[in-house]
Amino acid sequence: MGISDFDSENMAIQDTPFGYTMSVIGGKWKMIILYLLAAKQPVRFNEMQRQIGAITYKVLSAQLKELEADGLVKRKEYPQIPPKVEYSLTSKAQTLLPVLEQLCEWGEKNR
């Protein structure tokens, strides 16, 4: 089902494949997190926060939990002191990489 198949009279956008996609990757930070993980993985939490910059600890933590719950990010915790946690993309998230590449190409052509 594509854009041309959308029946605005009988369907809510959130019930479409587009709506599902936006529920998983939408928002201010999720695509940035996925982009960072696609460029370099695994990434530790503090390193990710430094790379992103303006994101708070609480927001980054919540976004990572949502991405993990949606099956896009995997979290690996090492049993050591101090605790060490690394994040990487799942195989499901890997299928989004061509879309991210297309967004990068679009940005390059249109900025």
Image: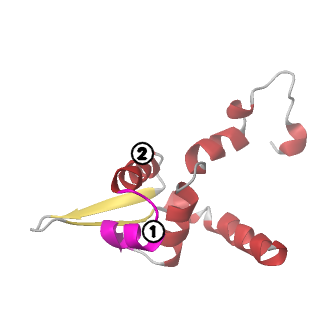
Q: Residue at x 48, y 55 (%)?
A: 72
Q: Is residue 41 magenta?
A: no
Question: What residue type is disc 1 on?
Answer: Gly
Q: Residue at x 49, y 63 (%)?
A: 33
Q: Is residue 45 magenta?
A: yes
Horizontally, is 29 left or right of 3 in the view?
left
Residue 12 in picture, x, y percent from top left: 75, 27
Question: What residue type is disc 2 on?
Answer: Ala
Q: Residue at x 85, y 44 (%)?
A: 3
Callout in the foreground (2, 1): 1
Magenta range is: 42-56
Q: Nearer the viewer, residue 37 or 92?
A: 37
Residue 67 versus residue 5 in the image, above or below? below
Residue 18 versus residue 33 in the image, above or below? above
Tag shown at residue 69: 2
Residue situated furthest right in the rendering:
4
Q: Nearer the viewer, residue 9 or 90?
A: 9
Q: How many marks?
A: 2
Q: Secondary structure at mark 2?
A: helix
Residue situated furthest front in the rendering:
54
Q: Secondary structure at mark 1?
A: loop
Residue 56 in picture, x, y percent from top left: 39, 56
Residue 50 in picture, x, y percent from top left: 39, 72
Tag shown at residue 53: 1
Residue 76 versus residue 20 in the image, above or below? below
Q: Nearer the viewer, residue 93 or 35?
A: 35
Residue 54 in picture, x, y percent from top left: 46, 63
Disc 2/disc 1 C-alpha distance (Å): 24 Å
